[in-house]
Amino acid sequence: MPDPVPVHVQALSPEEFAERFAEIHPPFAPQAAVVEATRCLYCFDAPCMAACPTHIDVPKFIKKIASANLRGSAMTILDANILGLSCSRVCPVEVLCEGACVMHRYNKQPIEIGRLQRHAMDYFYAHSPSVPVGDARGKRVACVGAGPASLACAAELRKHGYAVTIFDRQQMPGGLNTYGIAEYKLRPADSLKETELVRSMGVEFKLGVEADPQQLEGEFDAIFIGVGLGASQRLNIPGENLAGVIDALSFISDYKTGSVAMGRRVVVIGAGNTAIDAATAAVRLGASEVHIVYRRSEAEMPAFEYEYDLAKLDRIEFHWHAQPIRIHGAADVESIECAGGFTLPCDTVILAIGQSRLVDVLARFRGVELDGGRVKVNRETGQTANPKYFAGGDCVNGGREVVDAVADGKRAGIGIAAYLEAPPGATHG
């Protein structure tokens, strides 16, 4: 049996927490941002713009930074992506805009588009942030869920002049931006800046409530479904209900918004980006050893390469082709056993093997069709089989990046506006 270890990591002081969770992509100094902006070639065909799911006009916003027009730069970003602040911090730019940068052709470092976007957005939020809205249209839209897809949809609808109310069962808006992304990437305070911007556009938030689809149908002219996904999936192995087995998203949410009980020896099951977020957070919270256990090979790991590199820098140990078969312990976790007789002593097991589909929730929306637990939509408009309902984000795409959810929400907002503006009897789809 392993030697006894403390069950709980000592709470960090605010100063220690801030130091350990310092941002991994710090902001530019003003002059450095101008220098970086002037490296841009301002390509007319802009492959970086094409690579961005929200199609931000990257050359335009960077050129405005170079000419010291930071508010103009921010407005260019926000015109395409209302969550430009969070996306500047959490987007996988290495495989999106920066991955498409023409500088790669000349064996030069790509333009640091993400950090330049952050530079403009930080300025915007520090100087009376506001976004114009359209003239009132007299029709109302409900958005279910207060995550990135709903926020983007609501902002687009306000630009068209429609009244919007967002419903969410959580006490704070923002969805995974607030609750589920590692602190060193995006702080809750930054996520809430964006929700306040959307609120300032005239969007009403009803938080801590469970939306009733039948009631919404009677009160609103259209409904957007942006409920995301559920908790992490279960392993369905013996010992999974022992104290010390934690859902990865709950673990991240708890340490970001309160406190979390965690052992000194942590095993994370799964090797996606959320697994890396949980593992690196465990290191920063004081775990003495952290392991990632994955049933497939290193080459099949779903996490991005730069996330993997970050984990290795934190001395996280990876175990490949390791299939968990049992979690041992009397009441608390003591070890996890994998196929082949391989056992790791541990006090905490964090499950990060993908999120469950909210099939029961989605089934409450009348006439909305599902495919494999995902909402079926017209990809161009976000409209579902029931023309009054639109959808976007993780409940449609199965769980992608924040920027993909924003793109879905914006597209649906445009689709809803077209639906509401169409003459009676017009065909939609």
Image (cartoon, grey):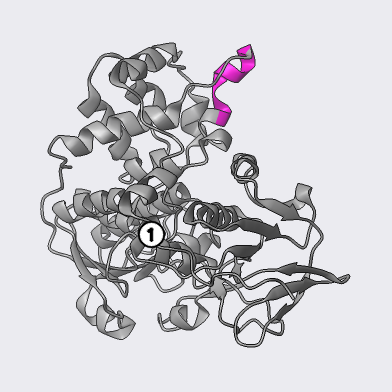
**Vertical comparison of 278 with 49: above or below:** below
Is residue 140 among what the camera can see? yes
The image quarter in which residue 240 lies: bottom right
Q: Amino acid at mark 1?
A: Lys
Image point 40% across, 80% down: which residue? 365
**Vertical comparison of 402 with 239: above or below:** above
Residue 271 on image: x %, y %: 66, 56
Residue 5 on image: x %, y %: 60, 70
Q: Nearer the viewer, residue 188 or 312?
A: 312
**Vertical comparison of 112 with 402: above or below:** above
* Name of the residue lying farthest toward the front: 3
**Residue 24 relative to residue 33: left or right:** right
Residue 4 on image: x %, y %: 63, 73
Residue 162 on image: x %, y %: 18, 58
Q: Is residue 340 magenta?
A: no
Q: Nearer the viewer, residue 24 or 301?
A: 24
Q: Nearer the viewer, residue 208 or 166?
A: 208
> Which quadrant is home to the N terminus?
bottom right
Q: Nearer the viewer, residue 58 or 334?
A: 334
Other-residue count near label 1 (Cα within 10 Å), few / some / many at <14 / 14–19 / ≥20: many
Magenta span: helix, strand or loop, mainly?
helix
> Which quadrant is home to the C terminus?
bottom left
- Element carrying mark 1: helix
- Reading the image, the residue beneath label 1 is 256
**Residue 7 relative to residue 171: left or right:** right
**Residue 60 relative to residue 372: left or right:** left
Is residue 377 among what the camera can see? no
The image quarter in which residue 63 lies: top left
* Name of the residue lying farthest toward the bottom: 330
- Range of magenta residues: 99-106
